[in-house]
Amino acid sequence: VTSVENVNARRLPSTPRMFMRGMNAPPRGLSAIPDITRLSPFVTRILGKNPSAFTLQGTNTYLVGAPNAKARVLIDTGDAFSSAAYTPLLLKAMRELNVSNIAAIILTHHHADHVGGVHAVLKALSQKDSSAKQEPVPVFKMKFPGDDATFVDVNDGDILHTDGTLKRNGTTVAQCSVNPNVTLRFLHTPGHTEDHISLLLEEEQSIFTGDCVLGESTPVFSNLPAYMRSLERLCDEFDECNRRRANGTPATLYPSHGKAIDDGAAHVRRYIVHRNQRDEDVLKALDTCPNRKSTPWNLTSLIYQGLPLPVRLGAVGVLLQHIKKLEGEGKVRIHPARGIASYVAPEVVTNAALVEVERL
């Protein structure tokens, strides 16, 4: 799940149906992304066919492998509701690439628009019309409560090698039935979710950033301090990629939503600047409030002035994360609200109604 700082309201049962219908449409002004795109000799993007305000043009899934290899790694699988439209595209892309096998599936995190389609994909692969039989497909994912028991757990620093071995500190912990013909290093990048991973493609010195960094807009996050540390790590990883790239061009960023970014390091740095600026926005807004106190909803209305109500409703959750981070840094104090009624956001009751924030 992603979006333009406009999520969380989705989970509220009191959210009006009209609002929810509006959230099913992707934001205007996004880049046009074809269903299937060969982005590089190693990387082909396939849209998940699930566009919305949360997923933008849809979830980007990727076939990754050496240019003439008969097998590929699939990164993410879209959601269950769109699998009937997505799986034929996946099989079409495999035919166009002359690929007969998926060596492994890697899931970046547990959100439904990434893992929801995995069983439909596995079924489609087992039934595909091909002279080459589809071998068993391991599904690699960092462990999270409620995961499918068949998923193979991965850790930070694990490496999937060209021969199909998944190694942890040099020791083989899993083996693909067919060779993936690429080398992928797993990077734990929590913050969006605790189980979020990014993937460094060694042959290309590029990085798949999942929902940690998008090609357009910005994602939501469950833990802002952890998210900021992940952004800093990705900056360092992109800098290393840039130093190792033989052709001198910046390392590419392949996001799970939105367009691919040619200069990944610069893009991630813009994310860091944006988040730091949002901290400053909260503090400056509090400075304008009586007694330097306000509610998260009032702060949201001040910071996001002029934006539509649905955007501001969702942005409350993002702002709450910034407030918690600032509290941890000793810059604000969070007080229980004296009462709920005067703090209720229009049509929706969120955590923003239950606290008051004081600037220290």
Image (tube, helix red, strand yellow):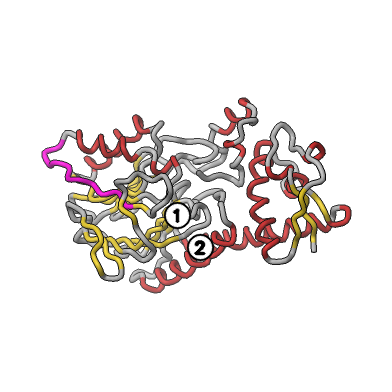
Q: Is residue 63 left or right of residue 115?
A: left
Question: Looking at the rendered structure, which numbered label has been put on residue 196?
Answer: 1
Residue 170 position (above or below residue 289): below
Q: Can you identify the residue that label 2 sits on?
A: 230
Q: Residue at x 49, y 58 (%)?
A: 190
Mark 1 or mark 2: name the one nearer the start of the chain. Answer: 1
Q: Secondary structure at mark 1?
A: loop
State the residue at coordinates (60%, 41%): 8
Q: Is residue 230 magenta?
A: no
Query: Label for residue 180?
Result: none
Q: Is residue 16 left or right of residue 193?
A: right
Above or below, 52 relative to 165: above
Residue in front for this viewpoint, 335 or 178? 335
Prevalent SS, magenta region: loop
Q: Residues within 10 Å of mark 2 (few under 14, many from 20)?
A: many
Span shown in magenta: 130-140
The kind of residue tagged 1 is His
- Relative to 206, does residue 129 appear above or below in the rendering? above
Toward the left, the furthest residue is: 131
